[in-house]
Amino acid sequence: MISLLLVIIYIAFVSLGLPDSLLGAAWPIMQRQLDVPNFYAGIISMSITDSTIISCLLSDRITKRLGAGLVTAVSTLMTAVALFGFSLASSLPLLFFWSIPYGLGAGAIDAALNNYVALHYSSRHMSWLHCFWGLGASISPYIMAYYLTNSQNWNMGYRSVALIQILLTVVLFLTLPLWKRVAKKAGTDKSVDSTPPVSLRHALNIRGVKLILVTFFSYCAMEATAGLWASSFLVQSRGVDAKTAAQFASLFFLGITIGRFLTGFIADRIGNKRLVRYGNITVILGILLLSLPVKTNILCLSGLVIIGLGGAPIFPAIIHSTPQNFGKENSQAIIGIQMASAYTGFTFIPPLFGLISDYTSIGVFPLFLLLFGLLCLLMFEWAQKTISHSEKK
């Protein structure tokens, strides 16, 4: 029973990652067919993210009322309908309209699933599940590329992913009884679901929460900036040819995915706290390699991969430790806020670096990453001391 539900959650995580890469893969054709300025891709993306942040902040109230299984099923259906809407859209206003349920559904799934896994499964499963999210995000560009190559039809790329989401929705509704059985067996069905929703003010006033939010924001800001600007830095500042730069930029994301897979084998033995600490230190070492002023580029390129490997355990390990650090009754609310903080870092910091690099130089890229890498490490260590001090009282 528990194993069957875990398989379903793994599939749900793959499905959660599928839509995330579609817009970027389809936009060159979409922009030409819709006849709109190129920067509208960023505005659509921000519209999706804003809706995602809202649903993450509301996740505690919604999930405690409906349950994680029903929230996941309904939100997956909402995402599927939104993707199908994207596939029918023939104008920019329609894309903006469908971006709202798209983001609301994605945020609700993300927060509900992460909290459910944190409550009911070990750290290794959290790491592997986020690895599967990376698998989904890696597959969708190939789905879109298939349709773009054969027919220049980005609509069918969205429609095919929508159909996958609809199939998953059917499976999720059919298996709803499993969620309650697993929660009942673990003893969390009454102890968590019967507690009243936690207000945003109360959650933020819990000792250590604000520090963990800054930790999350810092890591996601670093990861998103590295992923978006690595190729530009390698080409413009280090003289790497564009093809090699693109390959190593993709290896950064591959490093995160492989790192999460490998971390799963050792996560339960090492523990979440040391996973985050060692991951942060590895990230900083990778950034230092990226910044070394040497003629050979092998250290610089290797540094980018090392940043990905080091960052791999940070996100899932912090999420998994939330019930232990702040209490099971508070974890859904806090994980929702953590996800909102993460999406904020993902959305707003990479454009900020682009603005800074325009006024300075793309060469400040390693320094910018180092700033957020150090902030992530310092905030995490400060949070752990604050939480430990709170537990002793």
Image (tube, rainbow, N blue to C red):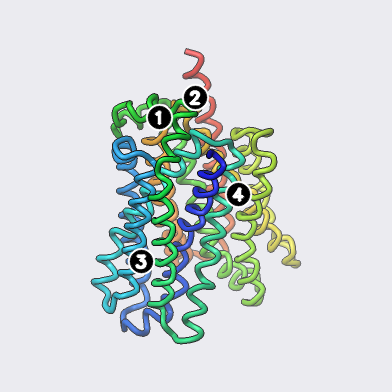
Compare residues 324 and 219 and report the one nearer the observer.
Answer: 324
Q: CA distance from mark 1 to mark 4?
A: 31 Å
In the image, what residue type sits under mark 4? Answer: Ala
Nearer the observer, disc 2 or disc 4? 4
Where is mark 3, residue-wise?
Answer: 83
Q: Secondary structure at mark 3?
A: helix
Residues packed near mark 4 inside 10 Å, few (<14), some (14 to 19) or many (20 plus): many
The residue identified by callout 2 is: 387
Disc 1 marks a residue whose amino acid type is Asp
Q: Disc 3 or 1, which lies upstream in sequence? A: 3
- Counting residues from the start of the chain, the first of labels 4 and 3 encountered is 3
Mark number displayed over residue 189: 1
In the rendered image, residue 336, in percent from the top left (x then y), is placed at: 38, 41
Q: Is residue 142 left or right of residue 97?
A: right
Going by the picture, which residue comes out furthest to the top? 393
Q: Position of residue 204 (x, y in %)?
A: 35, 32
The residue drawn where x is 74% and y is 64% is 298
Location of residue 43 in the rendering, given as x and y in whole percent from the top left corner: 33, 66
Q: Which mark is residue 312?
A: 4
> Could you tell which of marks 1 and 2 lies nearer the N-terminus?
1
Residue at 59% of width from left, 37% of height from top? 123
The residue shown at (65%, 66%) is 248
Q: CA distance from mark 2 to mark 4?
A: 23 Å
Q: Is residue 57 visible?
A: yes
Tell me the kind of residue under disc 3: Leu
Label 1, label 2: how many angstroms apart (C-alpha)?
Answer: 26 Å
